Each structure stands twice: as C-alpha cells, then as structure tokens.
Amino acid sequence: MIDFNNGSFCKLKKVDNASMADKITPLLIEGEEIISSYKAIRDFVIFTNKRLITANVQGITGSKKDLTSLPYKKISVYSIETAGTFDLDCELELYFSGVGKIKLEFSGSTDIIEIGKLIASYML
C-alpha cells in the first residue's frame, strides 16, 4: 500500500493505455475502463472511470508489484499545480478521506488541467 506519509510518485509521463492494460486488466471490474496511463521509470499510475490505480514496482527484477486502488468517491480534496517557466513539472495532490494524501508529479507536457477535470467529473 502507498505510504500516505510519503506517498509521492515522480516524473510520470503519459503512455499508451494498451501498453499498460495487461498489467491491470485482472483487477478491473465489469464496466471499468482505462481512461489514461502514466509511467515513471518502473512505477505507474492508471486512471480508470472508477478509480486511480498506483503501482510501486519492487525488487531487482520488477516482478513484485504493490498495487493500490484509490476510488474517486473517497477523494475529499484535490489540488493541481501547472508547470511554470523554470519549474517544468506539474503536480496533482489527492486527499483521501480516512487515509491521507498522495502526490503525483508529472512531466511538464502533461495536460494537468484535463486530469483535474477528470477527477472532478468522477468525485463530484
């Protein structure tokens, strides 16, 4: 499970949903679809129409994965920070009632406003 005291995923870049589908398809429930996928070096984050799934890939071979399911209905507050002139990364902070906060840091080319709208459409 994510360490909610230090729940941070850094330098996520958008990747093709098809390339990530095999990693989480067994977790998806009926009617759940992948909306967008982001990957760091080994870790990844997937937004579906029902929840956010994070993966912390562990070990030398990367065969061990810690997958955390974060339903949108548990988000109480979220914050987005757009990229700037010198700070090229954008950020998403999500506060989940009962568990805590996670921070996702994306490359500057990520459309963080679109991610914010996605979160709002499912949590409100």
Image: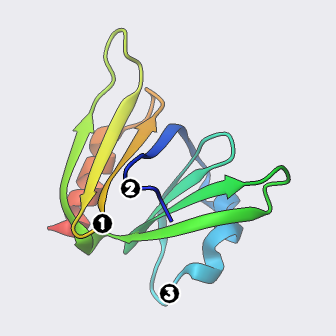
Circle 2 sits on which residue? 4
Indicate which label's residue lies in the foreground, 3 or 1: 1
Q: Name which residue lies at 71% across and 55% down.
A: 58
Q: Residue 38: x percent and y percent?
A: 54, 48
Q: Secondary structure at mark 3?
A: loop
Q: Secondary structure at mark 1?
A: loop
Q: Residue 61: x percent and y percent?
A: 85, 54
Q: Mark 1 Cα within 10 Å, few/some/many (few <14, many 20+)? A: few
Q: Mark 3 Cα within 10 Å, few/some/many (few <14, many 20+)? A: few
Q: Mark 2 Cα within 10 Å, few/some/many (few <14, many 20+)? A: some
The Cα–Cα distance between marks 2 and 3, rounded to whole angstroms, is 25 Å
> Mark 2 or mark 1, which is nearer the start of the sequence?
2
Indicate which label's residue lies in the foreground, 2 or 3: 2
Circle 3 sits on which residue? 29
- Residues 15 and 5: in front is 5
- Residues 122 and 92: in front is 92
Q: Amino acid at mark 1?
A: Val
Res 4 quadrant in image: bottom left
Residue found at the very far front of the displayed protein: 5
Residue found at the very far bottom of the displayed protein: 30
Q: Is residue 49 visible?
A: no
- Residues 91 and 21: in front is 91
Circle 1 sits on which residue? 99
Q: Is residue 14 above or below residue 50?
A: above
The Cα–Cα distance between marks 3 and 1, rounded to whole angstroms, is 23 Å
Discs 2, 3 touching: Cβ within 8 Å: no
Q: Residue 28: x percent and y percent?
A: 54, 81
Q: Amino acid at mark 2?
A: Phe
Q: Secondary structure at mark 2?
A: loop
Residue found at the very far top of the displayed protein: 86
Q: Is residue 82 above or below residue 100?
A: above
Discs 1, 2 touching: Cβ within 8 Å: yes
